[in-house]
């Protein structure tokens, strides 16, 4: 094979490679082409997703506020319960003192 034949064979191989590459690109472009209706549907889906995310964020915010409110009420109820228990303990002690006083100062029946 002389120099001219080598150049011609190389040129043919390169042209065939170019043609196959161009054909593959055309096929990929043809099958992945997005139609207008598909784009509209994608836009609707994106809008729905955005609205769902906003709703989720609002729900999370509401739940956090509600949780804080309930925790506050729980702490308040616990404080009231402790105060009531302390008051009850004081009343019981006072009742025991009065009972002991009555038993000491009044004659038995």
Image (cartoon, helix red, strand yellow):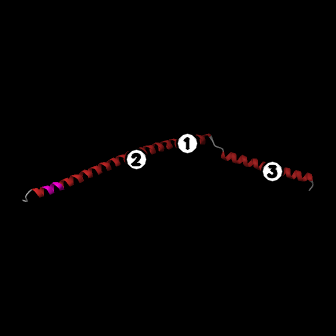
Q: Residue furthest front?
A: 105
The answer to whether the residue labelled 2 contacts the one labelled 1, judged by CB atoms less than 8 Å apart, is no
**In the displayed structure image, the side of residue 38 where residue 10 appears, left or right:** right
Q: Which mark is residue 1?
A: none
Give the residue displayed 15% in from the left and 54% down from the top: 98
Q: Is residue 58 found inside the magenta-colored segment of the image? A: no
Q: CA distance from mark 1 to mark 3?
A: 43 Å
Q: Residue furthest right?
A: 2
Residue 80, horizontal then vertical, whole percent: 29, 48
Q: Mark 3 against mark 2, which lies toward the viewer?
A: 2
Q: CA distance from mark 3 to mark 2?
A: 70 Å
Relative to 66, is 101 above or below? below
Give the residue displayed 38% in from the left and 45% down from the top: 69
Q: State which region is magenta.
A: 96-101
Circle 2 SS class: helix
In the rendered image, the quadrant that contains the N terminus is bottom right
Q: Main secondary structure of the magenta part?
A: helix
**In the displayed structure image, the side of residue 73 where residue 56 appears, left or right:** right
Give the residue displayed 45% in from the left and 43% down from the top: 61
10 Å neighbourhood of mark 2: few (<14), some, or many (≥20)? few
Give the residue displayed 72% in from the left and 47% down from the top: 25
Relative to 104, is 53 above or below? above
Residue on which the image places disc 2:
67
In the rendered image, the quadrant that contains the C terminus is bottom left
Q: CA distance from mark 2 to mark 1?
A: 31 Å
Residue on which the image places disc 3:
16
Q: Mark 2 against mark 1, which lies toward the viewer?
A: 2
10 Å neighbourhood of mark 3: few (<14), some, or many (≥20)? few
Q: Which mark is residue 46?
A: 1
């Amino acid at each position: 094979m002389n120099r001219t034949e080598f150049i011609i064979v190389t040129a043919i191989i390169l042209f065939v490679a170019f043609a196959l590459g161009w054909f593959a690109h055309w096929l990929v472009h043809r099958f992945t082409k997005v139609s207008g209706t598909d784009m509209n549907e994608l836009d609707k889906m994106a809008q729905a997703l955005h609205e769902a995310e906003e709703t989720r964020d609002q729900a999370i915010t509401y739940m956090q506020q509600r949780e804080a409110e309930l925790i506050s009420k729980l702490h308040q109820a616990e404080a009231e319960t402790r105060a009531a228990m302390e008051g009850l303990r004081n009343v019981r002690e006072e009742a025991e003192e009065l009972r002991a006083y009555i038993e000491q100062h009044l004659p038995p029946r």
